[in-house]
Amino acid sequence: LLWKRYLESTKSKWDLAKVIVPAVLFFVLLILLYSVFDFFAAGALEPFLVPLAFWIFVQRIVVQIMYEKSSRLQESMRMMGLSDVAYWTSYFISEGVIVGFLLSFILTIISAGGLFNDGNFGAVLGYLFVFCLSAVPFCFFICAFFDTPQTSGQATLALLFGLFVTHIVVFLVDLASIPVMSAQIICCFVPPIALQLGARSFLKSYDGLPLSAICGIMVADIFIYSFLAWYFSQVWPSKVGVPKPWYFPLQYSYWCKTAPNSQYQEIQPLPGSVEDGTAVAAPIPMEAVNEKLLGAPAVAVNKLRKTFGSQVSVNNLSFNMYENQIFALLGHNGAGKTTTISMLTGLISPDSTHGDNGASVYGHDILNDMEGVRQSMGVCPQHDVLFENLSVREHILFFAQLKGATYESAATEASSLTTLFHLENRQDHLGAELSGGQRRKLSVAIAVCGGSKFVVLDEPTAGMDPLARRELWDLLAALRKGRTMLLTTHYMDEADILGDRVGIMSLGQMQCIGSTQFLKNTYGAGYKLMFDKVPGMTKDQLANLTTFVQESIPEAKYFETDGCEEQAQYSLPFSTVSKFGPLFTHLDDHLSSLHVSGYNLTITSLEDVFLKVGEDHTVTPHEAKAPGIGARKYESNFISQTVGIAWRKLTYAFNDFITVPLLLLPSAVAVGAAIIYNLRVISSDLLINDLVISAMYLAGYLGAPGLIAEFIVKERNDKLRNVLTVMGCDFRAYWIGTFIADYIIMAIPMVVMWITWFAAGMSDFYAGTNGLNFLVMLLFNLHLIAFSYFFSFIFTNPKSCISLMPIVILMLIITPNIILLIVINICLAVGVTISVAVQGGILLWGIMVLTPHGALFSAFLNTTQNFSSLISSFPPVGAVIAFMVVESALFLWYAYYTDAQSVAVLPAREDPHFNPAVLRNLDEDVQAERERTLSTIGGSEPLRVERL
């Protein structure tokens, strides 16, 4: 795992930079602030800015872990035998020990310029390093409660902000009722607050808990949060994985594994009965198995059941699988195949069972010993789960070692498998660079590597070309020796060729089990005799044909087929083969009189069996016979497209959990700001209160641009934007509809903010400058959305968009200020003095121009305290509003123009290699044929391709 993380970090150019650069900028800003504003006491600013320097470090760890969790990489590694202890330990070493030490060392060197009140170098390094170590398991603990990187990333920022405010309220506000020492000890068990307390301990006036005690508690935090993360990741419900009961540490079976049961019981067809209020199906056709030849079942599934609400997905499913065989599990979409595989691999838990209900894999029960099951399991999921920054060879090396192989044997197997799967020419290419078919081959290679005994292949040949598919069939047929393979597929020829035994599911129940020949004999009618009718064949003529066939073979039966009026089909039993010769002789002599142009004979295929047994009962006959669309029924227009795009975005947003932090974080900050304002917990001075609350509003919207831009980036990344264009979506309708939807969403926290103003009596916000703040918030939403659209074009990955956008905003706020502070220092060095008022005004001009957050901050300071009248260099509210409007227009124009250019139709041009003289020198017969072909092309063809 450490080797894998090293490879990924070396191939990701910005992996460490996006953590170290913002932290370094914060520390440089600290140094410059002290050098310019000499009225700050030594060590006074560190408790406020040092925590901000580590916010990105904490958020990065959470987002990385949640990306692996949401993309099922984490669960895939577990299915391949990875233990939770090894997974979390590798993260602790790579993030806490390596990255944490590197970050702490760099920041300590920078702080040698006088930060932390000229504190001891070793003390500062140790204090920062211990925090990084404790922050990693703290992040693990956060991740246990979320399923997506989007939600967890924003929730982490919200939590860090809340803890930042908590420190201010508890320790910087004069609350005599709180015992300071006790509060400090308790708060040190929360690493972000402990970081702030540690920064305060360098102050000369500090008389609280010593730094050594703070670091000691943070060391204890490592073990406390490691335990909490381990426990809650096991019991907290998640989209993937099987949660354990809350009391699982008290179970004897968890700590003392029982030996796998070597005795298996053959599953028999279930008699009709009623169990748990659910009717069990009648006995199904099942081919007898010679266990003396095949041995005991390697995988036994008995009365497996899974429901989602009132929907029964798998209903008392039972079947056996044997070693050295491929068991093909078939069924229509929604039959329960993927749900069954998910239960067998531990992605989801089956419904509570009793007795011997459930499943076992090589003697390991899936309910009580999933770890034992996964020691011998290899999985090729329906959708490829690969690491973007690992090569083909590195994938096989990594997963083989996960299953216990040594590096030498894993390297040997990686070489042989890349050759076996014809990937030797691509073995050094990253997972993100492979085609769809190559990714499927790699997924199958990963499933069989490392000595996997039970191999699950969920549609392994999906997306492959016919040649590659048949090559994989030969490989799987050879690789099944010594393994038990479970195969799902929608290709009936694939199941027919590979399946030693075939099971067909429908509506969550098994309908039949046996070899392909057994199923054909059981469900097939024998042979199909098909006649090609001549045009205009009447019912009487068809009756004469039927009589003619039945004269030779009385057992022949005519059957109608939907959508095939040009053919007449008859079923012929297997027992009538001896009569085929005379029938064909008579047919050849009477084809014209029977009004048929030809005939052919086919044997019953597995597809015929599937259509008969596993038909989709959700499709009614009249739906199957629905007529073609024909002429267009609707004409789209600009307004209908705009409304449709807006409705689509709103529906998607309110069905997507990512909308929760987008709405909740600004709303929660607005409520918290109202409480702080009303209780005056920061200061009794109204100016300081308004300053802090304006800064809180800025922080509340810090993550919003990333969440807004993520949708745009995701649509481009998934090619959905191109699909909309191809289907005729107007560019203007797309952007206007998307903007309307985003504005409606962002209006919700805006209204919450307005309500808190009135509820908390914040008159300087709702009444200041004649209520201009209402207009400011309306324009701020416009500015924020346009800003998000503009920056969405610098990202190609939705995950990076969410995690990096807050960093971009912070850098846009900090970097100009650092440059300005450097200029001020230079001016001071040459004897030029710039007043503090002018410096503050210029700083706010910088953040106002570059970010919507800075514009909101500047506008609120003007409308609440009229700063522009006090400080001449301060940006007036009129200028702020003007910049909001102008920048919004520029950002929206850029987004529209860039998007239009990316999908614009290429200009038509003449082929430079086309020589008209070639056409004049054609042979006469060729020229005549060309002219004849061109003459048949009119103007009414649905599609016309000419000289392409």
Image (cartoon, rainbow, N blue to C red):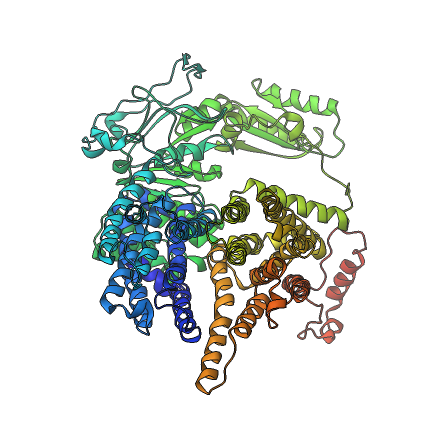
Left or right relative to 628: residue 830: left
Q: Position of residue 886 (x, y in %)?
A: 68, 65
Left or right relative to 907: residue 699: left
Residue 578 seen by the camera: no
- In the image, farthest residue toward the bottom: 830
Vertical order, 845 against 99 (above or below): below
Name the residue at 56% across, 40% down. 655
Vertical order, 780 against 919 (above or below): above
Q: Position of residue 697 (x, y in %)?
A: 54, 54
Residue 504 or 575: which is nearer the viewer? 504
Q: Where does the C terminus fall, quadrant-wise?
A: bottom right
Q: Where does the N terminus fall, quadrant-wise?
A: bottom left
Marks counted in the figure total 0
Name the residue at 26% across, 42% down. 227
Residue 567 seen by the camera: yes
Left or right relative to 352: residue 727: right
Vertical order, 14 against 134 (above or below): below
Name the residue at 37% across, 31% down. 349
Residue 630 or 696: which is nearer the viewer? 696
- In the image, farthest residue toward the top: 273
Q: Position of residue 114 (x, y in %)?
A: 32, 72
Q: Position of residue 835 (x, y in %)?
A: 52, 76
Name the residue at 61% across, 41% down. 651
